[in-house]
Amino acid sequence: MPDLEDLLIRPAVISEQKELEDLQLRASLTNIGDREALLAHPDAIELPVAQIAAGGVFVAICSGTIAGFAAVEPRTDRESEIDALFVDPNMRRRGIARSLVAHCAEVARKRESAFLYVVGNPYAREFYAACGFDLIGTSETRFGRGLLMRKVV
């Protein structure tokens, strides 16, 4: 794995919304299981300004370039949930997504959550398991069934 000494994770700013949505689309279209649905429903790619303004979106900068982003949201049960996790396809397999998950876990701890949840794409099950998430069920999403996973923070 390449050295991530120059990786910086910081809160997103509203002026980055379009760039982050473009990154989300590029990353999502590489997943064969989601490609057809996304092309049919391009409105599914949306990063709300309110979510950025609330401070729940974090950008990973690697070598001065936006390499990925994650969003972590509070749940009604006082726990936290990863709402988005995307890495530029050209920057994958460098530990960026794992670093973003670790950052989200730290945000959850600071919010005094006991758990960090994610509804993951079935293709991402091994990744989330490697990050310490346990499969606890399934959850219906706009495009089908997702895996409900959580980790202790």
Image (cartoon, rainbow, N blue to C red):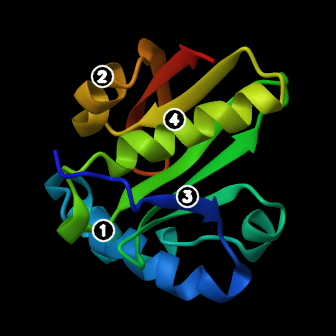
Residue 130: give its label: 2
| Image x and y of residue 147, in percent | 40, 27
Q: Is residue 60 above or below residue 26?
A: above
Q: Camera-side residue: 49 or 15?
A: 15
Q: Dividing the image into 4 quarters, which one contains the C terminus?
A: top right
Which residue: 49% across, 77% down?
A: 21
Label 4 vs label 3: CA separation? 10 Å
- Quarter of the image for residue 82 reads top right
Query: Do residues under tags 4 and 1 come within 8 Å of each other at their CB atoms?
Result: no
Asked if residue 9 can be seen in this view, the reply is yes
Q: Quick one: label 1, few (<14), some, or many (20+) residues within 10 Å?
A: many
Q: Camera-side residue: 6 or 88?
A: 6
Q: Residue flagged by tag 1: what amino acid is it?
A: Asp
Q: For mark 3, what is the residue? A: 9
Mark 2 or 3 closer to N-term?
3
Which marked residue is nearer to the observer: mark 2 or mark 3? 3
| Image x and y of residue 32, in percent | 14, 57
Residue 148: give its label: none
Query: Do residues under tags 4 and 3 come within 8 Å of each other at their CB atoms?
Result: no
Which marked residue is nearer to the observer: mark 3 or mark 1? 3
Which marked residue is nearer to the observer: mark 4 or mark 1? 4
Which residue: 26% across, 57% down?
A: 34
Q: Is residue 91 above or below residue 144?
A: below
Q: For mark 4, what is the residue? A: 102
Mark 4 or 2 closer to N-term?
4
Mark 4 or 1 closer to N-term?
1
